[in-house]
Amino acid sequence: MNSKQIFENNKNWVASKLAEDENYFENLAKDHTPELLYIGCSDSRVPAEYLMGIEPGDVFVHRNIANMVSDKDLNVMSVLNYAVDYLKINHIVVCGHYYCGGVKAAMEKSDFGDLNPWLKKIQNVYKIHKEELNAITSEEIKYKRLIELNVKEQCKNIINTKVVQKALTKRNIKVHGWVFDIKTGKLKNIND
Ligand code: CO
């Protein structure tokens, strides 16, 4: 992929949007009132808007390696604060995905240098659920289960943040846990 091609793609995209609605970008520039905050993995195979079939303006997005939420991470906490306090978003989703490289690296326990502190957070999720995970003999199933449990733990971390706890005294906020299966393209709801 070269940048020339990207700018060419962009030109075509602008033309197709304007063909549908000549005021499309003018309206887009006015404001945004997304109803969903999406916290997902940075993996190139898991493009948030694309897989949900939604358009610019529909979702506020934060992505990092393995869709982690920590109250010590200024980046994710700023996104969460802005989404809850200013955009007044009532639906927050943590979307993990099968075949997540971050989760795999955390399971390998090799030395990944500067990535080690980040992977430690995923290893901590393993520790919380080690009894269940150690009982799984298939590495593939264990890997998938850790991905699901990681999403559940990050949902809990969101609910436990100050900003969400404060907002919950005034309104209802729903936190959703999803997993995207790259092999089928399907989203799986793991809350129910
Ligand atoms: Co990933």
Image (cartoon, rainbow, N blue to C red):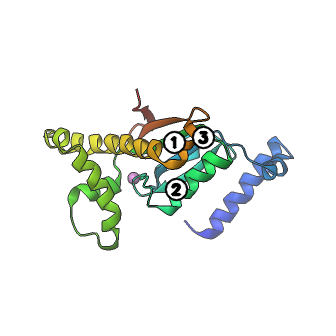
Point out the residue furthest to the bottom here.
113
Quadrant of res 135: top left
Name the residue carrying label 3. Answer: 36
Closest to the observer, 39 or 155: 155
Callout 3 secondary element? strand
Q: Amino acid at mark 3?
A: Leu
Q: Is residue 50 visible?
A: no
The residue depicted at 43 percent of the width and 51 percent of the height is 67
The residue depicted at 42 percent of the width and 46 percent of the height is 157
Q: Residues within 10 Å of mark 1 (few under 14, many from 20)?
A: few
Q: Is residue 165 above or below residue 115?
A: above
Closest to the observer, 113 or 140: 113
| Mark nearer the viewer, 3 or 2 | 2
Name the residue carrying label 1. Answer: 165
Quarter occupied by the C terminus: top left
Name the residue carrying label 2. Answer: 77
Which of marks 2 and 3 precedes in the sequence? 3
